[in-house]
Image (cartoon, rainbow, N blue to C red):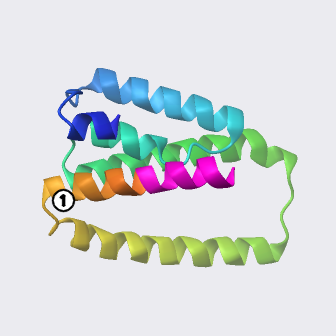
């Protein structure tokens, strides 16, 4: 999707309709197989969102998806006390990383951001095909 958009062959408008469809497909696949990788990023990039909005919507979708997963699957597991300490530490570092990334992304031109993300998606796809 992102590659087609960059090539000028796919033009989707950033409307609620496409955001809901992209979120629903990503959520469904994530619930079925556990991971969707960069599918959400590809959807938001194809919609032509500004870089910060693209990342923010992808992050919001991920939080919602993982909250639902924790509620659905969390009752089936018990966690040691060390798990919670690690979780809090990871959350803290993730918030700090997000704060730094936002400042970097705000300085990157939209077209450069789209090309960078599309290149990463291609690299990830090739790696997954080759490595399984």
Judging depth in this view, the residue of 85 and 5 nearest the camera is 5
Q: Which residues are magenta?
A: 122-132
Q: From what the image shows, is residue 129 above or below residue 33?
A: below
Image coords of residue 70 (percent x, y): 68, 47
Which one is nearer the viewer's eye here, 92 or 29? 29
Residue 124 is inside the magenta segment: yes
The residue where tag 1 is placed is: 112
Which residue is situated farthest in the front direction here?
130
Which SS type dominates the magenta stretch? helix
Q: How many marks?
A: 1
Which one is in front, 8 or 42? 8
Residue at the image point whose x is 41% and y is 77% from the top: 96
Q: Residue at x 46, y 56 (%)?
A: 123
Question: Crowding at label 1, few (<14), some or many (≥20) Cα neighbours within 10 Å?
Answer: few
Question: Does residue 23 show up magenta in the picture?
Answer: no
Horizontal side of 130 relative to 100 (left or right) equals right
Residue 31 lies, in percent from the top left, at 66, 35
Answer left or right for 92 relative to 14: right
């Amino acid at each position: 999707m992102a590659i087609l958009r960059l090539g000028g062959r796919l033009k989707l408008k950033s409307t609620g309709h496409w955001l809901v469809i992209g979120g629903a497909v990503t959520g469904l696949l994530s619930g079925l197989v556990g991971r969707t990788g960069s599918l959400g990023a590809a959807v938001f990039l194809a919609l032509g969102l500004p870089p910060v909005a693209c990342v923010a919507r992808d992050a919001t979708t991920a939080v919602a998806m993982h909250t639902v997963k924790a509620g659905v699957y969390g009752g089936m597991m018990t966690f040691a006390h060390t798990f919670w300490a690690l979780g809090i530490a990871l959350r803290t570092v993730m918030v700090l990383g997000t704060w730094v990334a936002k400042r970097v992304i705000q300085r990157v031109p939209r077209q450069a951001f789209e090309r960078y993300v599309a290149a990463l998606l291609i690299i990830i796809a090739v790696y997954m095909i080759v490595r399984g």
